[in-house]
Amino acid sequence: MNEHEKWVKKEKAMLKKAKEIYNKCNACFNPNIDLDSVGDGIYDLMCEECWEKFRKEEKKINEQLICKKIKLFGLGSEGKKSYYVFDKQLTFFAFLSAFLEKLHIEKPGSLYEYEDNSLNLEDVTDTFEQVANDKYEIDIFYGQKRIIVVIRSDQGRDSYLDLMKEFVEFKGF
Ligand SMILES: [Zn+2]
């Protein structure tokens, strides 16, 4: 991705986020406004609170675009179960956020902390988190240097592997 493409991607991602935030805000809600045609005029419509939320999201979008991909050290699967061994970096949480959103799975506690900029990697050491919906069951083990993710699903890896590839650096892909 060259600089221009990056910029376009970022602008698009930010506009989408701005609309999402605006949509959820009771103070800003206005049935007379057509969000599809408002374009970047959305930024003028946002209230202070929306704006503050948006600033945080902007920071994350920047991280996702600028950050190097997370290293994936290994993966394997057996039957309905697949596992992935990631390098333990903050970028992992940017990936996890996008990943769970795509699969429509609720976030674990660590992700809320990451989004508030209060997550310390040391705090998620030798700990375990579990998230699931009706299609996927995901276990996340946080070690000292690695994060191991185990996904159990009938859906097959193809349902999420492309998304993983966007964030992950792995020679096997
Ligand atoms: Zn608002």
Image (tube, rainbow, N blue to C red):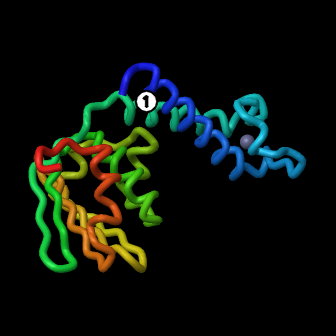
Q: Relative to the observer, which residue lies in front, 41 or 124?
A: 41
Q: Residue 56's spot in the image, x, y percent?
A: 52, 35
Where residue 89 appears, x then y in whole percent? 22, 40
Looking at the image, residue 128 lies above or below residue 6: below
Quarter of the picture holding the N terminus: top left
**Vertical comparison of 21 with 75: above or below:** above
Type of amino acid at the residue the image marks with label 1: Asn
**Location of residue 113 in the rendering, given as x and y in whole percent from the top left corner:** 40, 48
Apparent side of residue 102 relative to residue 120 in the rendered image (left or right): right
Direction from residue 66 to residue 86 in the image, left or right:
left
Nearer to us in this view, 95 or 47: 95
Q: Quadrant of residue 143?
A: bottom left
**Badge count:** 1
Classify residue 167 as left or right of residue 77. Answer: right
* In the image, farthest residue toward the right: 32
Under circle 1, the secondary element is helix
- Please, is residue 135 above or below residue 26 in the view? below
* Residue at x-position 33% and y-position 75%: 155
Q: Tell me where residue 149 sits by quadrant.
A: bottom left
Residue identifier under label 1: 62
* 94 sits left or right of 50 in the view: left
Residue at left 35%, top 65%?
159
Image location of residue 141, percent across then percent down: 19, 61
In what quadrant does ligand 1 lie? top right
Near-viewer residue (47 or 97): 97
The residue located at (43%, 27%) in the rendering is: 6
Looking at this rendering, what residue extends furthest in the top direction? Answer: 3
Q: Residue at the location (74% across, 44% down)?
A: 36
User: Around disc 1, counting alpha carbons within 10 Å, would you say few (fewer than 14), some (14 to 19), or many (20 or more)?
Assistant: some
Quadrant position of residue 52: top right
Indicate yes or no: mark 1 CB to ligand 1 under 8 Å: no
